[in-house]
Image: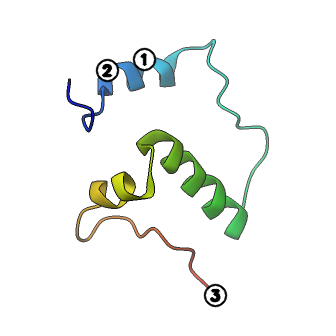
Amino acid sequence: MAADEIDYEALAARLVDPEVETGAHRELHGEETAARGRAFLLREYGSEEALRAAVWPGGPKLSIRKP
């Protein structure tokens, strides 16, 4: 597997493994939710550049919306 490819089978196995701590302990709202989601994506993709490359036109935005 190339360095820029994602092992979806390994990711799926981690997501359904009951031994893996998900960190979901309380509900999050607003900017805290956006910050935690962004931190998660950066951990998964490894860098800001890799994250931006993974986002396609019309896909999710990577900024915090201001009300």
- The amino acid pointed to by label 1 is Ala
Which quadrant of the structure image shows residue 2? top left
Eyeballing the image, is 30 above or below 4? below
Which quadrant of the structure image shows residue 26? top right
Q: Which residue is mark 3?
A: 67
Residue for point 61% across, 85% down = 66
Between discs 2 and 3, the one toward the N terminus:
2
**Image x and y of residue 60, in percent:** 38, 65
Tell me the CA gap for discs 1 and 2: 6 Å
Which quadrant of the structure image shows residue 37? bottom right
Q: Which mark is residue 9?
A: 2
Left or right of 50 on screen, residue 22: right
Q: Which residue is mark 1?
A: 13
**Image x and y of residue 29, in percent:** 71, 63
Residue for point 64% across, 30% down = 22
Local SS, label 1: helix
Q: Which residue occupies the foreground of this view, 16 or 39?
A: 39
